[in-house]
Structure formats: structure tokens, C-alpha cells
Amino acid sequence: MLNRYGLIAIRLKSVLTIEDIGRKLDIKIDRHDTLQFMRALQADENRIGLYENNLLLCTDDSFGFFIEQLEGLPARILSTFSSEKICAVYYYSVVDLYGYSYFDNGRRIRTKYGEHEDVWVDIGENLSIEKESQSIIDVESWIIEQVTAMTLGHFTGIKMAKFELNA
């Protein structure tokens, strides 16, 4: 059972390498330190990977997409990939904290986060997958199976390289 994880998924319109993305986002990538996706999702460090035309970043910085004024890595991502679809999710099981945010062409379509059944921020119309799910009790499975699938499809076998933000 996962305790805490964050994921940012970006559907890329053009073909990019990990190195291209590192330069665009000003991050340092260690291609020699890799993990399988599900292990990367559970790691206490930042991870990046590509699957077909999808960029995946496993990072607690995904939480930054839930605030109104984006800063740091989320701001870099939104400005760099302003014409792409971006989905950010976060879950922390100890306090049942969850959140997700969906952007399309630089515009926020949906953001929702809270704790257990207390919703702190609820922006935009419910996505179709929210209408299908009647509760947030199983948020962990819902995020992995539904939200990421909406943006990416199946990508569990990919390798995720370690990355650090440049100062």
C-alpha cells in the first residue's frame, strides 16, 4: 500500500528526449539511476520517464498544481508545455490527503483537493471519471487506475530516471 506519492503526466505533442526535457525544465537528470514506474512512484526522490508520447514525473511537487498561482517546478512545466495536456495528482494516506489538477492548452480545467471527505478546493466542472466514481474512499486506486489512464493509458513497465531541480 502506498503511503505518499505525486505524479505529473504530460501528453507531448512532439517527440522529445529526456535530455531535451531536462534542458527545457532546467533539471539535472541521472540516467544511470533508474527504477520501474511503480517503485519510482513510491520513492522519496524525484523521477522522470517517457512512455510513447507521454512524460511522467514522480514528485511531491505535483501538489504545487493545486494552488492558484503556480510556482517552482509546476510553473516551469506549465510555461514549457503550455499547449499540452497536463494531469497532476497527489495522495498521502496517513491523513487521507488527495488532490488532482488537469490543464489543457495552458488553461486549468479541473482542480480538486482536500482531506478525506473535506474538500478544500474545487475548481471547474467534474470530469467524466469523477462522475463515474461516487466516492473518494479508494482515492489511491482511483488516481492510479483512472486519472492517469485518462491522460496516459498503460505505462507501468517504463524506467524512471532520477532528477534534481537546478538552482
Image (tube, rainbow, N blue to C red):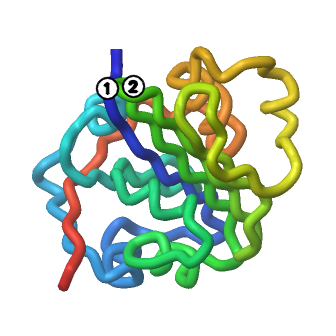
Q: Residue at x 62, y 43 (%)?
A: 152
Residue 77's spot in the image, x, y percent?
A: 50, 74
The disc placed on residue 3 is 1
Residue 157's spot in the image, x, y percent?
A: 40, 30
Of residue 131 and residue 30, the one placed in the foreground of this image is 131
Q: Is residue 22 left or right of residue 117?
A: left
The disc placed on residue 93 is 2
Q: Amino acid at mark 1?
A: Asn
Do labels 2 and 1 touch, CB within 8 Å?
yes
- Whether 148 is drawn above or below 105: the answer is above
Of residue 17 and residue 136, the one placed in the foreground of this image is 136
Q: Residue at x 45, y 46 (%)?
A: 7
* Mark 2 surroundings: few (<14), some (14-19) or many (≥20) residues within 10 A: some
Residue 8's spot in the image, x, y percent?
A: 49, 53
Q: State the image quarter where residue 145 is shown.
A: top right
Q: Is residue 105 left or right of residue 74?
A: right
Q: Residue furthest left?
A: 32
Q: Residue at x 44, y 78 (%)?
A: 71
Q: Amino acid at mark 2?
A: Ser
SS at badge 2: loop
Mark closer to the chain start, 2 or 1 = 1
Q: Residue at x 61, y 53 (%)?
A: 87
Q: Is residue 84 left or right of residue 66?
A: right
Q: CA distance from mark 2 to mark 1?
A: 5 Å
